[in-house]
Structure formats: C-alpha cells, structure tokens
Image (cartoon, rainbow, N blue to C red):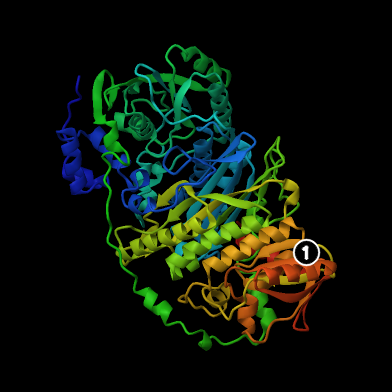
Amino acid sequence: MQHTETLPTLDTAKKLGLTEAEFDKIVKILGRKPNFTELSIYSVMWSEHCSYKNSIKWLKTLPREGKQLLVGAGEENAGLVDIGDGLACAFKIESHNHPSAIEPYQGAATGVGGIHRDIFTMGARPIAALNSLRFGDLSLAHTRHLVDGVVRGIGDYGNCFGVPTVGGEAYFMDCYNQNILVNAMSVGIVKVGETVSAIAEGVGNPVFIVGSATGKDGIHGATFASADLTEDSAKDLPAVQVGDPFQEKLLLEATLEAIKTGAIVGMQDMGAAGITCSTSEMSAKSKTGMRINLDKVPTRQANMKPFEILLSESQERMLIVCHKGQEDKLLAVFEKWDLQCAQIGEVTNTGMIEYFKDGVLVAHVPAESLVLGGGAPIYNREYREPEYVKRIGKFNPSVIKKPKDYIQVAKTLIASPNIASKRWIYEQYDSMVRTNTMTTNRISDAPLVRVKGTKKALVMSVDCNSSYVYANPYVGAMIAVAEAARNIVCSGGEPIAITNCLNFGNPYDPEVYWQFVEAIKGMGDACRRFNTPVTGGNVSFYNQTVTKEKAEPVYPTPTIGMLGILKNAEEQMTLDFKTPGDIIYMIGTPTNDINSSEYVRLIHQVKYSPAPQFDLDEEYTVQQNMKKMIRNKMIRSAHDISEGGLFAALMESAMVNHFGFNIETDDTFRKDAYLFGESQSRIVVSTLEEMEDELVNFLNSNNVAFTRLGEVTTGKIMVDNQNYGSIQDWKLIYETAISRKMEEQNI
C-alpha cells in the first residue's frame, strides 16, 4: 500500500537544502513528486557531505593508483594498502567540524567513533588514532570552552574505546574563532583477504541492523554539515550525535567475531544519513535493491516518524547483509556480546529501496539515484582568484624591521600556541594502550606503532599549515604533502599513501572554490612526486561563519593524513640530541625567506605574505638522501624545520634530554630569516664528531645542500656567541604556554 500524504512543495525542498533544479531532477527520476520522506532522503544523500557534488570533478584528478594499494578512493569505507607479511592497513581521516563547533564534547567524541567504525567495518582492528585540530584565539573564553570540550571528547571516547591516540596537531588562528575544525584519523590492521566489502549481493539475503538502538540524535546531520554556520546554528543542536564508546567497543569485538563465522556478505557502518546511506550505497554498489521494514528497527523513542528513523545518525550502528540460512551464526555472536541484532529487511533484485512503516510503503526510490556516479548531481563551479592575493603580491620583506632583542622574540615565538608544546592536550589522551606505541619515550617527527608479529612499524603523520595554503593554495597544499612525508622520512619510514580531509568555505563562493581547485592541483602534483596515492578521505565545505554583516571562511585547510612503513622498527630515527659534543648540521638550503612564518604573523602582525620558499624537486632530493643517511647510520637525530623555523627545531631537539646547543648563523642572510624563517625542505640533524667527514662527503657527492651549525652542549643555549640562557628555562616556557592560558581562566 502506498503512503498518502500532502506532497511537499519546492519551498519545502529549499528548506531541506535542495535547489529548484535538484527538486525538478528528483521529480524526473521518480516520475512523480516525492513525498516528504522521499524528499528528506534525497536532501541528505544529495547533500555535499554525502554526494561530493561540488568536489568530485576535481577529486578525480588526484592520483589513485599505487603498487601497494589494495582498495582505492571511493571503493570502500576506507583505503587499504598492502604492508607485507600477509597484512594490510586500513586508514582514513574525516571531519566533524560543525557538530564540534556547536557541542564540542559530543561532536569530537562521535567524530572519533565514526572514523574507527569506518576501519573495523572493513574487518580491520583499529590500532592508532590521530587528530588535526583548528581553534581560534586562545585568549577568548569561547575558544577555551571549545578546546576543553573537544579535547575531553576525543580523549574520553578514544581512551574508553581502547585505541591509542598517538599523534596529531593543533593550531590557533582567528579565522577559526567560530568555525573550528576537528579532523579525526584512524589506522587499522587486517589480514589480506579477510576484509569485508560494503555490498548487498544475493537476492533474498536478510538485512540486519546491529548495535545501538536508533534515536532522534543526528537527524539531518549530513544536511547540517553541508550548510554555513550562522548565529542561529545552536538551534540545530539535535543534529549533533551522542556517542557511547563502551558500546562501540562491544560492536568492534562482535563484528570482528561475526566476520570469522563466514555468515556476512557485506557490512557498512551507519554514519552520515544513517540507514538511508547504508541501504542505498550497499544496494547501488551491488546493483540490487532492498525491502526494509522500519517497524523492525529498534528505537529509543516511541512513535518515531519514518524520516526520523531513516535519517537518524545515532552512533554505534552497522548494517549487515547475511547469507540466507546463516542468520543463527550472526544472532549468536551479537547475543554473546549483548548487542541488538534485528533483521529489518532483505535484498531484492529491483534496484529500488523500498521502506515500509505500519504496512505502508513510505518511500520507494531507485538506489542508484541516491549515490555519487548514479543520479546524484555533479557540478562545475565557477572560480576566480581572490582579491586578497593582490595584497600578498605586494608584500615587501625589506620593510620588516629586524629585531633589536632576538632573545625576547625567540621566547615570544616559543610561547606561541602554534609552536609551544601541546602537552596540555595530548596528556589527556591514552597513547600507550595496546602497548604498541613506539614514540612514547623515543620521540620522532612522526608517531610509530609496532605491527605485532613482524619487525615492522607503521609511521603516521597529519599535516597542514593553513597559513601557507591561504597565501598560495597550490604551493601550500604541496607543502602539506611534503611535510607529512618529511616527518615520516625523518622518523625512518617510507611514505606509501595518503588520506585527506579537505576543509574549505562555501563552494558557491568563486574565491573559495579557487582555493579548493588550486589546493587539489598542488596536492596531486606532490602526491605524484612522492608516489603516495590518495586512498580517500572527505570534503568538508561550508566552514565559515555567516553573520548579518558578512561571511567569514576559515583558511583553506587540506589536512593530509599520511601512512608510511618502517620495515625494521629498530631503525627508528628520533629527533632528540644524544650527546654533548655531537655536531649539528642543517640539511637543505637556507634562504632570506620570512614569508607566512609565525614570526612575521605574530611578531610583526603581517597577515598577507607569500607562501614560504618551496621547491618540490629539492624536497624530493632531500628526503631521498635522508633515507640513506638514516639507513647508513650517519646521523643520530633528525628533526624537520617547520613552524618557528630553525630556532624552534633546535629547541625541540635539545629539550628532550635537557641538552643545549652552540650555533652560529650565516651573516649572508637576514638573521631573523635564518633563525625564524620557515622556508621548506630543511632538516636539523646531529652526528658523532668522528662521523662528520663521512656525512659531509656523502652530502657533497649527492649534491645535497648543507650547513654546519655548531655542536650540542650540556645545557646552555648560545647563538653567535650570545648567551640565550639555560635549556631548563626555555623548556618551562615551551611546555607551560598552553596550560597557563587554559588554567588561568579556570578551564
């Protein structure tokens, strides 16, 4: 029996985020006007968050092939790469920005839960988590509230779930005052050949929903994530999901055990758009259909309407297609783990998704019409270079006055939240659970996690300096890829693939879309150079705050999550200076560049300057030779030069073991640029005095630029024969800068 109701109008469609053209397309697909439930289904599935309608054209230009790649972008819930020894690694990064800006604790917590489900729905066990966070001015009470909530949300969920948070990054800039960014990454391990696909094959096979009951939290969450944040966005609080990490832990163990029974045909987690997304995407992928009885869905509230059940984004739920006749195996496993496992439908051969409630057909739509590559719209957006780029082009570094007091400038920079230790944040995360984390006591540029049963370690990194991308999206995105690779290489690893989380403003703004297009081009070129294919990720548009006066987009932030392999974990390279008397070198070319540095932004209050000096070929050469130096044991430490420049890198290498350093700058360069500039492709290394000649000969023979800076000392900091004080004093500034800002305000 077909559901009868007053059919929605174009005005209703617009309120749900659909355009007039999209409404007309839906009518054409169905051959009739949609009812409200059907219109709601299309509104979430055709939202930017689910359909990538404004980005897929450019995403397809990214490199997607590699010799170790088993599952590429868009094929499954996460990318999958072969890491040898019969094992594969599943990894992915995604955003949970809008929910975290409205309700920071649950927004961040459910972001962590959702990304882990993407990993274990493929049959992989999550072994590590990372995050990339962007907040506003830390002196603002609102920012401190958001920082506190997000960090607790990530920590509480991850700690309870039992997966170590091993690394990440956090930046503080005014453009994120309202619209913060919370990007979560998960990495998991699975035996090759034991993965599960998100398919719905086999007509007559039963369809089960497992895990938590369905509630009203998260309804239209995908639509919420595909719109601007406004002064009234707090009214959308019901769009934020509520997480339960203990339930997710049970779901993890139950699903991995259920996979081993052989009863599962296909499985997909319920993230954005809930039941709607899982049923339609699994059906479309297999060119089948489903008949779903919404009365069978376990619910937390009575009398939920069909669209509420379908669009709910309640957490800790999965959709499973089971082999017919093996239902008892599935039921037994979930009963053992005290989790709900309810059959809600079956696979059909109609190509249609049929949803019933109280015996009434409440929605009847073609599965293919809901998904990317099927009926979902694809747009070619207009783009043009922003006006502010002209201001950047007018930047003249010669007008920047050199400091009178370099020590005070250095202290101000070391205390900047963008450079200072993130200890206040990471100490709230459990980094040691499962006992595989290698960088708890031996600190490297990138975190390492042992692969049990092998000699290998996974090396991971998340990177993006959005100031560079704002200044030049093409170069800035290349730098994000290059720095992620550089961090992995400096830790001893070999970069093999990336996932990305592309955070931008409104794609209908031509200047924002120009940033997006240029960033994609830069990312693609860098990934091709480093042979690191893109395995997936997500696009997060509409990251801007709209007031009555104006729209303020965040800086373009294409966060790169990179995976690397260290074949022998004993060859890990750390960043800390080892012994007084060791010789310190800078690998790479120094320049007079202060562009987009923390120094020029914080000390001189310059917002508009070009991206730092970067040459992709030089970067590649430096990294290739760095691998050889590490393998041949020519160096004792390696640390890349990034935010804060050379001085910050030296400090971070010195502070670990409370050593100091005595260096001399090169007077052919501006001293402020030499110490605080952030030109790329440079690494600080240390070596034994007796290894110095071998290192120099190697660098000369391979045409690698280098500079002898000085030596490691027992604890005093000396620059150009000037005493900068003791390492203990500097370490106190560095490690307490963020905690003092938070604790002084009773947070």
Foreground: 254 or 141?
254
Residue type (three-letter) at the residue carrying disc 1? Phe
The quarter of the picture where residue 289 lies is top left
The quarter of the picture where residue 297 lies is top left
Q: Position of residue 625 (x, y in %)?
A: 66, 62
Q: Is residue 613 left or right of residue 423?
A: left
Q: Residue furthest front?
A: 701
- Would you name the residue on which mark 1 appears? 577
Q: Position of residue 216 (x, y in %)?
A: 39, 34
Foreground: 522 or 528?
528
Up-down relation of residue 496 to residue 397 (above or below): above
Up-down relation of residue 693 to residue 338 (above or below): below
Q: Is residue 401 left or right of residue 711?
A: left
Q: Residue at x 32, y 52 (%)?
A: 54
Q: Residue at x 37, y 20 (%)?
A: 202
Q: Is residue 729 visible?
A: yes
Q: Quadrant of the C terminus?
A: bottom right
Q: Secondary structure at mark 1?
A: loop
Up-down relation of residue 444 to residue 537 (above or below): below
Up-down relation of residue 6 to residue 233 (above or below): above
Q: Quadrant of the N terminus?
A: top left
Q: Residue at x 32, y 45 (%)?
A: 47
Q: Position of residue 221 (x, y in %)?
A: 38, 42
Q: Position of residue 367 (x, y in %)?
A: 29, 32
Q: Is residue 195 left or right of residue 7?
A: right
Q: Residues within 10 Å of mark 1 (few under 14, many from 20)?
A: many
Q: Is residue 418 visible?
A: no
